[in-house]
Image: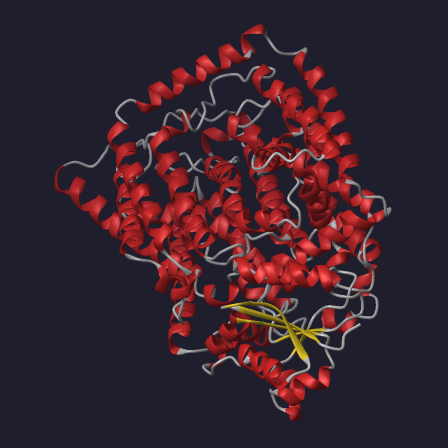
């Protein structure tokens, strides 16, 4: 029997009555800590750092000291670590990956729940949240400190870490040097790229040969390391981080100060909550799920980030890094193959073109959901899991992220219910009834917390239930429109999605052919395919198919990694490193395939770059508009691909002039005059959206110039890609 995948709990040596043998592969090196070592009651270094964060962040929030870069990083660390570190220290988890994931779940979950409670009561305040969480974190740290040993101090911890890194780095020098050179070439390439070179191929048009050489070399380096029967943890970890940096960082760096335009609206929601302390009712359905926005309303002022533009810009890269620990824990919980554990995050990054990792509730809710599933799978592995973890304590901890999911996003809660049900049916969780708790959270919040949304909108919610053809058409066919070049880029997205499904299917077949792995295969398949049940419910604004893939991708990545391992004819820990001709062929073939996937992801992810990027000048014009606009003044734009979402949430949203909204008036001056607007905001990104999706030139900038020439308008701001006009007779 192959030992690549952990046998099912009810089959073979890993049943609860007979603990499974411990892994002996790369999951025990510097980047994937040993399962053998009993975890200390707590690391004094980690607890000391947590205590410092618990004290410093509330003080920074109170004093508003301008500490660029450092202050935002401290606040992000606060959200991720406090009070999770002392809680997990008291819990006594052995596995370091499980500890890291649980720390994040407890910390972020508790802060979202507290922020939601305060904003619902109309008293949200950044200082209150940071002070309460900091106080709780400090008290728990003191309690956890008492259970530590003197040997857990900073000196001992650092010495042990240096020893482990030194051992892991033996023989890794050449690979790490090569990786450094590849990243240097990439950095030069992205530094030379510019948005002025965007065309209907999107981001691809702006990237020179250096970037593509770096991407190809990165694929080859990954394949070289994966040819080993036991990939070195330090090297594998560095390669995974480099892949995420290149794939997520390229559009972040090239596309200017912001990506997906909806993120600006999210910042506006958060700013309203921070300013007023409460929720704006009757304005936007998303206010009915305020959890993420409430947390954002704490983070932005606590970090001293002004309107939050910097956080919006770097959120995709941050989320791309944060998804790695729960993804690795998920892979380690079902697979004993070191290659699968390394391949899973590479597959996830390589096929994640969906751009739902921007500053949005979806991104946070997905991280929490994946973390909960990964921790439950890890703890539910019998003797290989966490035998000392009390299930009642675990239940209490998991309630925090589950409640945070329920109050933050519309789609993630029902998907979470389904995934928890899958774990219960597969008997891979110590909390088999947790899905009922999540179902209760979802129903209660929807009925009582989100009543402002569903009251009077039942037709909108249930109008497309069961209309599978219509929902699929809205999510696929209706979205593949535009110029030939743009459609080709959108086709690449479909190719990636189809390929990951194919590879996942191969991995599923590989698992179910082995009786000892069959239940694991079916469980992963259910986790991957379950989210597609959303197609039965509604179109979700034409995005339901894409959202299904977003939810399915973590489990698909593990299945696909298993399939890739099988296709390349390699096996996990039982196999030796290939020799002879096979040792040369496998890295070349694997490197070429990986390079193609990574390059395709860069191209597919950047397909919408011409109209989703926000320039510094567009943001400057928007900030000027925010400062000068009157409360009831009408702002007219020529699309939604701009940062006007940053306008105060309590004020009327900007109106859109387009062929659809202008109707019989025609898209021109007569339509603009019909709106009787006080402000005109024209941008090159709005024109680019029209040009790429219809094949006809956008006219917004030209119409604004014509208005200015005929008189009655004053030029407030001008740049190559934006023109802001104010009516001469306004107030």
Residue 667's place in the image compared with 692, above or below, is below
Q: Residue at x 59, y 23 (%)?
A: 93
Residue 151 relative to residue 597: left or right: right
Residue 338 relative to residue 265: left or right: left
Residue 507 relative to residue 475: left or right: left
Residue furthest to the bottom in view is 664
> Residue 204 lies in what quarter of the image?
bottom left
Q: Residue at x 41, y 38 (%)?
A: 341
Q: Residue at x 54, y 33 (%)?
A: 378
> In the image, residue 241 lies at what x, y percent?
41, 39
Residue 450's place in the image compared with 489, above or below, is above
> In the image, residue 304 lies at what x, y percent?
66, 40
Quadrant in which the C terminus appears? bottom right
Q: Nearer the viewer, residue 260 or 198?
A: 198
Q: Nearer the viewer, residue 302 or 151?
A: 302
Residue furthest to the left in view is 581
> In the image, residue 239 lies at what x, y percent?
36, 39
């Amino acid at each position: 029997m192959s030992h690549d995948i952990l046998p099912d709990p009810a089959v073979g040596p890993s049943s609860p009555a007979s603990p499974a043998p411990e892994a002996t592969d790369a999951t025990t090196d510097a980047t994937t800590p040993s399962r053998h070592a009993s975890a200390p009651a707590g690391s004094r270094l980690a607890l000391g750092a947590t205590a410092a964060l618990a004290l410093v962040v509330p003080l920074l929030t109170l004093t508003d000291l301008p500490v660029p870069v450092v202050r935002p990083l401290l606040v992000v660390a606060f959200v991720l670590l406090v009070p999770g570190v002392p809680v997990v220290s008291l819990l006594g988890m052995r596995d370091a990956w499980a500890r890291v994931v649980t720390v994040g779940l407890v910390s972020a979950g508790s802060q979202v729940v507290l922020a939601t409670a305060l904003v619902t009561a109309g008293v949200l305040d950044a200082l209150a949240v940071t002070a309460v969480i900091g106080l709780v974190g400090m008290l728990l740290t003191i309690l956890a400190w008492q259970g530590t040993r003197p040997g857990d101090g900073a000196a001992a911890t650092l010495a042990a870490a240096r020893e482990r890194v030194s051992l892991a780095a033996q023989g890794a020098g050449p690979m790490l040097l090569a990786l450094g050179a590849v990243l240097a070439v990439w950095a030069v390439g992205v530094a030379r790229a510019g948005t002025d070179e965007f065309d209907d191929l999107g981001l691809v048009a702006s990237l020179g040969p250096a970037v593509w050489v770096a991407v190809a070399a990165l694929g080859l380096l990954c394949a070289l390391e994966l040819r080993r029967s036991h990939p070195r943890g330090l090297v594998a970890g560095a390669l995974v981080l480099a892949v995420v940096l290149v794939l997520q960082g390229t559009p972040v760096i090239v596309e200017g100060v912001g990506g997906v335009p909806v993120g600006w609206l999210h910042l506006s929601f958060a700013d309203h909550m921070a300013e007023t302390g409460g929720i704006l009712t009757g304005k936007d359905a998303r206010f009915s799920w305020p959890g993420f926005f409430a947390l954002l309303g704490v983070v932005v002022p606590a970090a001293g980030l002004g309107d939050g533009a910097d956080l919006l810009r770097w959120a995709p890269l941050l989320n791309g890094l944060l998804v790695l620990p729960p993804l690795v824990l998920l892979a380690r919980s079902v697979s004993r193959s070191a290659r699968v554990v390394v391949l899973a995050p590479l597959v996830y990054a390589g096929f994640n073109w969906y751009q739902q990792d921007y500053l949005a509730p979806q991104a946070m809710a997905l991280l929490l959901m994946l973390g909960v599933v990964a921790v439950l799978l890890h703890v539910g592995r019998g003797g290989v899991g966490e035998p000392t973890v009390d299930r009642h304590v675990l239940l209490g901890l998991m309630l925090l992220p589950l409640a945070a999911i329920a109050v933050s996003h519309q789609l993630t809660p029902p998907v979470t219910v389904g995934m928890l049900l899958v774990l219960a049916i597969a008997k891979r969780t110590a909390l088999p009834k947790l899905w009922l708790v999540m179902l209760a959270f979802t129903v209660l919040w929807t009925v009582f917390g989100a009543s402002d949304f569903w009251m009077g909108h039942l037709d909108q919610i249930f109008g497309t239930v069961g209309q599978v053809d219509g929902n699929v058409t809205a999510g696929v066919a209706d979205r593949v429109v535009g110029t030939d070049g743009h459609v080709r880029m959108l086709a690449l997205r479909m190719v990636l999605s189809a390929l990951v499904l194919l590879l996942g299917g191969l991995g599923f077949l590989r698992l179910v052919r082995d009786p000892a792995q069959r239940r694991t295969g079916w469980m992963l398949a259910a986790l991957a395919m379950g989210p597609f049940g959303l197609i039965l419910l509604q179109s979700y604004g034409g995005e339901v198919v894409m959202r299904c893939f977003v939810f399915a991708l973590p489990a698909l990545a593990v299945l696909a990694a298993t399939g890739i391992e099988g296709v390349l004819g390699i096996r996990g820990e039982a196999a030796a490193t290939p020799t002879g001709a096979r040792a040369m062929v496998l890295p070349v073939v694997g490197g070429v395939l990986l390079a193609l996937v990574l390059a395709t992801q860069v191209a597919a992810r950047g397909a919408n770059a011409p109209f989703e990027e926000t320039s510094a000048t567009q943001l400057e014009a928007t900030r000027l508009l925010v400062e000068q606009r009157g409360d009831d003044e009408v702002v007219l734009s020529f699309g939604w691909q701009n940062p006007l979402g940053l306008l105060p949430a309590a004020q009327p949203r900007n109106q859109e002039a387009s062929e659809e909204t202008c109707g019989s008036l025609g898209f021109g001056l007569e339509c603009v005059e019909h709106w009787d607007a006080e402000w005109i905001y024209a941008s090159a990104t709005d024109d680019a959206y029209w040009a790429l999706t219809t094949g006809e030139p956008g006219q917004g900038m030209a119409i604004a110039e014509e208005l200015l020439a005929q008189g009655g308008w004053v030029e407030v701001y001008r740049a190559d890609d934006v023109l802001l006009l104010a009516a001469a007779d306004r107030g």
